[in-house]
């Protein structure tokens, strides 16, 4: 097989076109000449050093050099495209669940298509199309959801019948299929050659490429990259890009300042066969049979088929060099289930002769999404790795986004789902990674129903109340390693039923969450929200206020005891974070952010706060347990426990007070609930958590108190049109676009980050608008439920996608939140979205290909909440101002 | 009607027994790690017996399987008594004296054997006094005979076998005033049993065999594969030298009638056995004992029946053939089993199945395609078979059970077929014996480290 791949490599004719980087004779014998002296000595310095000559490293080099950066050195420890890139199956597939990944794959496809023309390197690009098969109705729904996404992106795609599958592919057994998705523009490439083509183009643009040079560690001074140490000497540099694939984790940990890159390799097997008697056409579509866990592509007249088995074999847990990639063994017994699936899908292949079983390790990440971006701890240290076996599909797009990020400071898309900073040190335990990737790899082909949760690596971070809540029937989900309650199963309910609530339709927790919501509306509920990220920022003088006033968009110079909702915006006015900040004293602030902001927000502020020893920022997330008391009777419970007046006069909305609750003193009570409902957040020093919880539950009994979970919270906040960062809001959304101009101090004449962009928007209007949709003709019991990412149609034309959705128990309707854009009917150009444009349209939401009528609203239903007391209206009315 | 896999398992595991030789200070000084045994009945009640015991006054361990015929009485008696006869034969003179003195003065007796028994392996309480008296007579004779020489294991085994068979014969001739015991000793003598017994002491393994049960050594070759070494010869018509022996012991005139249809006198499959006085006593003795015996015996057609061409008894002996083998580190296990196993499985397969079971599935040789021409279909068939093998290993905690599963459930491809297994196990009592025989298996696992160390010392 080695000879086979060498043959592939020898087809490449890049050497002549590349004067700086080569000196290897064209003959393939040269590959054995490891002792050959290095022709070109390493430069002493460069702007960028990229480590890794696989598809990722070469793609980053290619895009950086295209964008005008020339002083780039790419280092490869072995040969270019010799690792996972060389061995991977070469399938370019756009059928992806996450729309960002879909965009990356689409870009990659288009890039590879023209790469041979651009570089003269034969990339083996063949447009074959791909067919994803469905053996079950649920799988077909899943495919239809992807098809909806692909269609609105302009990528041709079709849901087809089993009969049509048979027409497209002669070998497929269709008797057990219910349907399929056909994506005609998906392609095959020779992945190593794509990488070499990118390297060739980069080299022509001035990128220096050095093979057989390994990076031992990265040099860091004062939190900045200053250079790299290699086995051939040092290179000074400003930027370092870690594209070391499955070695990225170790490389990240090799320096004095560790960079956590949570990924772990698993063995991945695929089969190569000799050609069929009548060799398969090279343009025969690639088959993906996720229910059989396999993919099948044509390969030199025969087939190449691999898959993602249920029982993956993680490797290199203890680090590299214990086993060389080249020495990995074929494991036929392990491959047996996949071979059975293959023969079931294509029974005629029985007589086909085996050529080889290839063992090609792939790296996987804790959440099945790739890792890109800058280290939160070392500036100038960028990462692109952890492709979860889709390196070829993502390579082009991921390289482009990372290059943009480095050159412009931010990429052209919201890449938060892939941002390295979504992880912290807590995800970098080797044991955690080993266990988690064993779950992730099979998940590649598992059915992804709404609201699935990872089962491994759980119970890492928990509230002190975890056991108490668990004993009361809590069902848990995990965010950033923290266990959070979804809902509470009432005693006597059949638990088995509930654990099988994985469906695209109405889930069986529907009534449970409904009763929790009802209790929030009519009495009082307590939700443990301890996972929120909490920072304290204080200073000896006015430094804290001054710095925060610049970094946050809302006015923080409020009286002590007030709470301010504010965005933390970037230069473009987009939300880097959305938080609540309480002014504890003249000089200290308490900041509450979403759970997954712990790393990102910390890094953002650290990098921007002045270097002043009198200004301190502390992460106090672990110090406080947060209980959310939601409901009209919350005030009664709290006043009985504190003997303090909590009437709206004494405790208006958006207020923060330290007070005693039960015996415990120093509880930070805030009159916000993150839902628009009346109530309080209690920030409790953890040692008092159990006491306060017990007191609240005992006292609350006469007011009908009960536990509730995040699903109830979700339903409440969505029906109130509350946007959440990370779901609805991102770095590409401004306060203007989601009706939050009132949270911005534009009129106060103060400088703050993003101000100019917002002023421009205020003047010229916005190009997208956060809108609430009420589904009209949707049958909650019978129809598919919306999730997020559903296309929105206005007067039959695509205008945007939903970002979150929930069933509103008050409206007895589904509510979807999402952004509406305005594309010119002829040119497709983006136009300003006006209130009239929103209001004067007929809307439909597409759920897995089925469209439901929806009513668009720019403001929440205030009429629903007329019985609320005044203080709540303050919180609400704030959101209604435009 | 099918048995579910759990039902199949509960049948297969009903009689399984395992013994692990205890370790001292983390070290096992015995060359035996332990053994697994099991039996699956076809007759009702089962006619096979098994025994295992550690010798307490000498070194070594005794293990044996006994295949009864014409009832289970003889096999039961042999399984209770034979190891005592062997142990006594091995005892030095001083110990014999000590024991005799203890009995004489009514003191507590030194224990001779530590039994390793399944709860279903019973001892007859009623006969224990009778059996003990016979045994005591034997050791008294040994004391009188005191040769002064150290006991040779081979000789001891032969003497023990012959003496026990002799005692069985005598007890039946003498009878007992107790009518229950009287009937019992007659049933023991008129039924028969083969015996295959192993004595393991350090690297010295002795197999004493009488009849058609078999002892087989499992050897792991350097490449990890398994091979079988026979440590006993079957005493039946298939064994040429055994047929020769029988013919030598009788006049030429009987040559044709001695072995008919592969049976001794056209009746008996094993050519050596305990009991079976119908092939040992003179016709007169048989008639006298039957006539004076209890009615049950008199009414029994079988006991009254005299074998045809019965001219020069005895035709049958219990004298064993003894094979001595020095254990080597590559000798990993010993299988003792009644013919129920060997008639369904080749010893080579037995060696492989037990070997792979004991070393764990992870030692299953990985498959490499290499330069061979293999089609996807062929590979698939091979892998499915390997998987079936692995899954059946996981079900069993006992090597003997695992062997029985294969013996009963194997299809033509050599893999366990649940459907077949279920059918074979759900046969009604009256049919079961037509499809399979009683199977009794003991798998003894050796300690290669201890054996290696012993070797180096020698």
Image (spheres, rainbow, N blue to C red):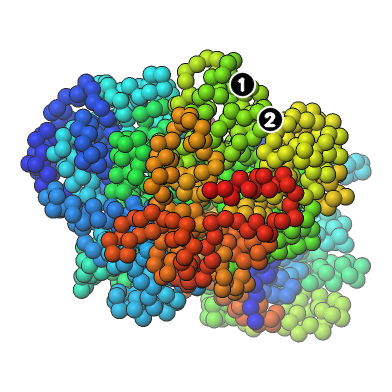
Residue A587, numbered label: 1
Give A607 or A341, whichever is nearer the viewer.
A607
Percent x, y of residue B238: 50, 71
Q: Is residue A600 above or below residue B299?
A: above
Q: Is residue A833 above or below residue B102?
A: below
Relative side of A651 to A183, left or right: right
**Disc nearer the start of the sequence (2/1):** 2
Q: Is residue A162 above or below residue A553?
A: below
Residue located beneath label 2 in the image: A561
Give A534 or A207, whichever is nearer the viewer.
A534
Relative side of A303 to A444, left or right: left
Give A111 or A457, whichever is nearer the viewer.
A111
Q: Quadrant of the N terminus of chain B?
A: bottom right
Residue drawn at 82 percent across, 79 percent down: B297
| Whether residue A385 can be seen here | yes
Residue drawn at 61 percent across, 70 percent down: A780
């Amino acid at each position: 097989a080695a000879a086979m791949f060498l043959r592939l490599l020898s087809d490449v004719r890049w050497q002549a076109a590349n004067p700086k980087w080569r000196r290897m004779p064209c003959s393939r014998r040269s590959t054995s000449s490891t002792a050959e002296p290095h022709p070109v000595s390493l430069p002493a310095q460069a702007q960028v050093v990229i480590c890794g000559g696989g598809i990722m490293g070469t793609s980053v080099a290619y895009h950086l050099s295209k964008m005008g950066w020339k002083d780039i050195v790419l280092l490869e420890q072995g040969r270019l495209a010799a690792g996972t890139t060389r061995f991977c199956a070469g399938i370019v597939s756009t059928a992806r669940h996450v729309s960002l990944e879909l965009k990356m794959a689409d870009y990659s496809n288009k890039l590879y298509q023209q790469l041979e023309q651009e570089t003269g390197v034969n990339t083996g690009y063949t447009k074959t199309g791909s067919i994803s098969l469905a053996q079950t109705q649920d799988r077909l729904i899943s495919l239809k959801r992807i098809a909806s996404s692909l269609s609105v992106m302009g990528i041709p795609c079709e849901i087809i019948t089993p009969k049509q599958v048979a027409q497209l592919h002669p070998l497929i057994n269709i008797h057990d299929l219910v349907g399929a998705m056909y994506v005609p523009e998906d392609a095959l490439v020779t992945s190593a050659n794509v990488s070499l083509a990118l390297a060739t183009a980069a080299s022509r643009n001035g990128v220096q490429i050095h093979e057989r040079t390994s990076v031992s560690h990265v040099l860091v001074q004062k939190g900045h990259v200053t250079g790299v140490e290699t086995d051939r000497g040092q290179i000074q540099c400003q930027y370092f890009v870690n594209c070391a694939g499955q070695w990225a984790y170790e490389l990240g940990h090799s320096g004095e300042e560790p960079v956590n890159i949570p990924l772990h390799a698993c063995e991945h097997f695929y089969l190569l066969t000799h050609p069929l008697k009548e060799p398969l056409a090279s343009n025969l579509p690639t088959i993906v049979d996720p229910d059989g866990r396999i993919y099948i592509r044509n390969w030199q007249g025969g087939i190449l088929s691999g898959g993602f088995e249920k029982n993956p074999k993680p490797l290199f847990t203890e680090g590299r060099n214990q086993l060389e990639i080249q020495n990995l063994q074929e494991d036929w017994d392990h491959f047996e289930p996949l071979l059975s699936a293959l023969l079931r899908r294509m029974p005629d292949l029985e007589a086909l002769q085996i050529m080889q079983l290839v063992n090609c390790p792939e790296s996987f990440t804790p959440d099945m999404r790739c890792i890109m971006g800058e280290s939160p701890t070392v500036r100038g240290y960028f990462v692109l790795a952890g492709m979860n076996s889709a390196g070829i599909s993502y390579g082009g797009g991921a390289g482009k986004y990372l290059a943009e990020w480095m050159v412009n400071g931010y990429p052209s898309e919201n890449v938060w789902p892939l941002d390295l900073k979504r992880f912290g040190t807590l995800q970098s335990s080797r044991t955690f990674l080993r266990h988690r990737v064993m779950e992730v790899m099979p998940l590649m082909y598992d059915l992804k129903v709404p609201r699935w949760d990872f089962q491994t690596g759980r119970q890492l971070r928990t509230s002190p109340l975890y056991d108490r809540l668990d004993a009361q029937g809590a069902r848990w989900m995990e965010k950033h390693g923290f266990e959070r309650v979804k809902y509470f199963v009432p005693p006597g309910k059949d638990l088995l039923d509930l654990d099988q609530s994985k469906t695209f339709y109405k889930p069986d927790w529907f009534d449970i969450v409904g009763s929790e919501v009802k209790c929030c509306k009519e009495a009082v509920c307590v939700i443990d929200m301890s996972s929120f990220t909490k920072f304290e920022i204080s200073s000896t003088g006015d430094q804290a206020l001054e710095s925060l006033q610049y970094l946050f968009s809302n006015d923080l110079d409020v009286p002590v005891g007030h709470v301010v909702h504010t965005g933390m915006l970037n230069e473009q006015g987009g939300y880097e974070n959305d938080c609540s900040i309480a002014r504890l004293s003249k000089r200290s602030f308490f900041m509450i952010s979403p759970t997954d902001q712990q790393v990102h927000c910390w890094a953002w502020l650290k990098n921007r706060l002045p270097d002043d020893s009198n200004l301190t920022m502390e992460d106090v997330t672990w110090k406080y347990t947060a209980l959310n008391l939601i409901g009209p009777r919350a005030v009664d419970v709290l006043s009985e426990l504190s003997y303090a007046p909590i009437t709206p006069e004494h405790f208006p909305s958006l207020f923060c007070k330290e007070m005693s609750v039960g015996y415990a003193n120093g509880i930070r009570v805030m009159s916000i609930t993150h839902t628009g409902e009346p109530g309080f957040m209690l920030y409790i020093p953890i040692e008092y958590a159990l006491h306060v919880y017990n007191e609240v539950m005992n006292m609350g009994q006469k007011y009908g108190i009960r536990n509730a979970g995040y699903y109830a919270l979700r339903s409440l906040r969505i029906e109130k049109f509350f946007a959440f960062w990370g779901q609805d809001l991102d770095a590409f959304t401004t306060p203007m676009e989601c009706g939050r101009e009132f949270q911005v101090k534009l009129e106060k004449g103060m400088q703050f980050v993003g101000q100019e962009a917002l002023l421009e928007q205020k003047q010229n209007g916005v190009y997208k608008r956060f809108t609430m949709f009420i589904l009209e003709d949707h049958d909650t019991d019978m129809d598919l439920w919306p999730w997020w990412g559903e296309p929105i149609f206005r007067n039959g034309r695509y205008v945007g996608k939903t970002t979150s959705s929930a069933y509103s128990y008050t409206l007895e309707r589904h509510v979807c939140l999402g952004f509406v854009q305005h594309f010119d009917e002829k040119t497709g150009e983006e136009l300003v979205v006006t209130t009239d444009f929103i209001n004067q349209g007929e809307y439909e939401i597409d759920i897995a290909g089925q469209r439901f009528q929806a009513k668009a609203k720019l403001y929440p239903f205030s009429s629903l909440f007329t019985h609320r007391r005044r203080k709540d209206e303050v919180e609400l009315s704030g959101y209604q101002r435009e | 009607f099918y048995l579910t896999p759990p039902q199949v398992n509960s049948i297969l595991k009903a009689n399984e027994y395992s013994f692990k030789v205890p370790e001292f200070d983390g070290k096992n000084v015995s060359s035996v790690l332990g053994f697994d045994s099991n039996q699956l009945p076809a007759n009702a009640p089962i006619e096979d017996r098994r025994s295992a015991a550690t010798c307490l006054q000498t070194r070594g361990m005794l293990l044996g399987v006994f295949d009864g015929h014409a009832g289970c009485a003889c096999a039961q008696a042999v399984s209770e008594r034979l190891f005592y006869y062997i142990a006594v034969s091995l005892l030095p003179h001083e110990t014999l004296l000590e024991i005799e003195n203890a009995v004489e003065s009514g003191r507590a007796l030194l224990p001779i054997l530590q039994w390793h028994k399944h709860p279903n392996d019973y001892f007859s309480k009623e006969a224990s006094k009778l059996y003990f008296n016979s045994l005591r007579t034997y050791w008294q004779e040994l004391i009188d005979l005191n040769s002064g020489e150290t006991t040779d294991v081979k000789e001891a085994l032969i003497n023990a076998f012959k003496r026990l068979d002799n005692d069985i014969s005598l007890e039946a001739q003498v009878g007992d005033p107790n009518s229950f015991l009287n009937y019992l000793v007659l049933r023991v003598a008129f039924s028969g049993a083969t015996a295959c017994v192993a004595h393991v002491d350090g690297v010295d393994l002795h197999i004493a065999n009488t009849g058609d049960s078999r002892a087989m050594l499992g050897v792991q070759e350097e490449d990890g594969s398994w091979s079988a070494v026979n440590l006993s010869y079957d005493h039946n018509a298939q064994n040429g030298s055994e047929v020769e022996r029988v013919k030598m012991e009788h006049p030429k005139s009987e040559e044709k009638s001695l072995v008919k249809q592969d049976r001794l006198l056209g009746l008996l499959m094993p050519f050596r056995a305990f009991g079976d006085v119908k092939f040992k006593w003179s016709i007169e003795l048989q008639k006298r004992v039957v006539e004076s015996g209890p009615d049950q015996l008199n009414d029994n057609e079988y006991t009254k029946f005299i074998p045809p061409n019965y001219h020069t008894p005895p035709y049958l002996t219990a004298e064993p053939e003894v094979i001595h083998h020095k254990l080597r580190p590559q000798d990993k296990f010993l299988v003792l089993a009644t013919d129920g196993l060997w008639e369904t499985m080749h010893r080579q397969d037995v060696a492989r199945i037990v070997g792979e079971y004991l070393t764990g599935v992870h030692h299953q040789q990985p498959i490499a395609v290499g330069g061979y021409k293999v089609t996807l279909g062929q590979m698939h068939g091979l892998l499915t078979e390997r998987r079936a093998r692995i899954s059946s290993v996981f079900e069993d905690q006992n090597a003997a059970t695992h062997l029985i599963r294969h013996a009963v459930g194997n299809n033509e491809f050599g893999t366990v077929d649940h459907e077949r297994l279920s059918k074979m196990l759900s046969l009604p009592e009256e049919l079961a014996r037509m499809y399979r025989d009683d199977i009794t298996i003991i798998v003894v696992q050796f300690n290669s480290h201890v054996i290696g160390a012993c070797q180096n010392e020698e």
